[in-house]
Image: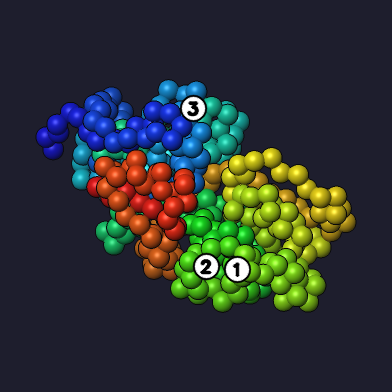
Amino acid sequence: MKLTRMMKAGILHKAGNIRCESIPVPEINSGEVLVAIKAVGICGSDVLRFSRGVSPYNFRVLGHECAGEVIEVGRNVTSVKVKDRVAIMPVISCGKCDFCRSGEYSLCDNFIRMGTRIDGCFAEYVKVSPENFLKLPDNVDYESASILEPSAIALHSIKRAGILPGDVVAVLGCGPIGLLIAQWVKILGARRVFAIDVAEEKLEIARKMGMTDCINAKNEDAVELVMRETRSRGVDLVFDSAGSKITFEQSMRMARKLGKVVIVGLVEEDVTLPRETVLAILRHELTIYGVYDTDTKPIPLNSWQTSLYFIEAHRLDVKSLITHRFKIEDIATVFKKIAGQREKFNKVIFVF
């Protein structure tokens, strides 16, 4: 494919200033591949970096939830070919540290992440090592494939804590990852799932996905209602995918004795817990798990491969998460609207 050697990309200049500009197409070496991005999602971490400004790392382009088509292949690459359709796994690990040697690549001591430490996918083209590809079957479109990364994180968060058939689960925060967690726990045998948010439009998406126990925490005391519905027992497993001071505390208060709490959402401010909440953690002997990324261990099926299988089989609804589609030329306006909460969004993607 003949390329003009310039491309459009969203360039982050400083806090609150991101613009679509023309920059050179990345040059690949003999072991790299050039991908034409077809769909890329906006993650909450992208919005956080937009609001805080340029990081100390030498990169300008955000974006890491993406899929596209291979258009150039380095001469030493044999595992992929031109026109292959791929999703991109954004964490680049060193392969040498203790975590890499044990297969926990996302915990690599020396990891590089696209869109946080090197240029990411808010661009027409990106260069990638073929080890970071997942080939797409014909019946999985690029938009669905761009949601593989948050789906894999959602599944990994459940693997961290473990779930048993018949468990009662609460999910605080019905953004994309929260709604994916809610779907996964139902697939994995949860008897009841409480979907909790303060935005009615997000709860409407949850209902569309089959969630029947939806709580608008803006209108009701979520902890009180969950405890009443569980006859004061609490839930077996709580996922905080909102990352707020309020949900952090609520998650501890609605877990049952010996319950498990999984912190998935990025916390943007200091969190101080009331003494009674800390005592509940101690007296109820709660187990708290942190989740940062996802597993990519090849054996058994990792969370990426499993997500792809369930999307391909139409068992996981990812399309309902997408509320807005834009062109990369709109990036400045889109980020200002999202950061300023001037419009109601769930999953927003750029399409090329």
Drawn side of residue 167 relative to residue 231, left or right = left
* 10 Å crowding of disc 2: few (<14), some (14-19), many (20+): some
Colouring convention used in this rendered image of the protein: rainbow
Residue at screen point 58% across, 72% down: 214
Quarter holding the N terminus is top left
Amino acid type, mark 2? Glu
Is residue 184 something one can see in this rendering? no
The residue wearing badge 2 is: 200
Closer mark to the observer between disc 2 and disc 3: 2
Q: Label 2 vs label 1: CA separation?
A: 7 Å
Give whichever of 58, 114 is nearer the camera.
Answer: 58
Q: Label 3 vs label 1: CA separation?
A: 36 Å
Amino acid type, mark 1? Asn
- Res 185 → quadrant: bottom right
Up/down of 86 relative to 6, above or below? below
Give whichever of 25, 331 is nearer the camera.
Answer: 331
Q: Label 2 vs label 3: CA separation?
A: 34 Å
SS for tag 1? strand
